[in-house]
Amino acid sequence: MAEARHARLNAQMELAGRSRKGQLKQADRLAARYVALLDGNGGAVLKDMQSGDQQEVATAEVVARVLRDRGLR
C-alpha cells in the first residue's frame, strides 16, 4: 500500500469484509482502472477493469506493472 501511494497511485484496501464479487463491484463504482487481488502467498491477480484482462503477477510487481501499463515508467 505504501509503495503504491509513494508512486502517487490511489490505493485502498478492502476492510469491510466484502466477497470477491462485492470487492470488484465496489472497485467498479469507484471507477478503479486496476484491481490487485492478493493471495497471501506472495502472488496476486492484477485485473484491468476497463478491458477485463487479468494476469498473475508477484505481489512485489503489482505497482511496477500498473505504472508500466499506464506508461509512467
Image (cartoon, rainbow, N blue to C red):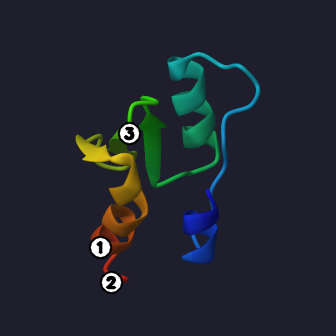
Q: Which residue was labeled with disc 3? A: 42
Residue 56 picture location, percent across and down = 24, 40
**Quadrant of the image occupied by residue 29:** top right
Horizontal relation, residue 2 to residue 62: left or right: right
Report the disc number at residue 9: none
Residue type at numbered disc 3: Gly
- Of callouts 3 and 2, the N-terminal one: 3
Residue 3 picture location, percent across and down = 56, 67
Residue type at numbered disc 2: Arg
Residue 46 picture location, percent across and down = 35, 45
- Of callouts 1 and 3, the N-terminal one: 3
Give the farthest residue toward the top: 19
Decide: is 22 above or below 57.
above
Say which element carries label 2: loop
Assess whether mark 3 and mark 1 are in contact (beta carbons under 8 angstroms).
Answer: no
Residue 69 picture location, percent across and down = 29, 68
- Residue at 29%, 73% in the rendered image: 68
How far apart marks 3 and 2 lie (CA) works out to 23 Å
Q: Which residue was labeled with disc 2? A: 73
**Quadrant of the image occupied by residue 10:** bottom right
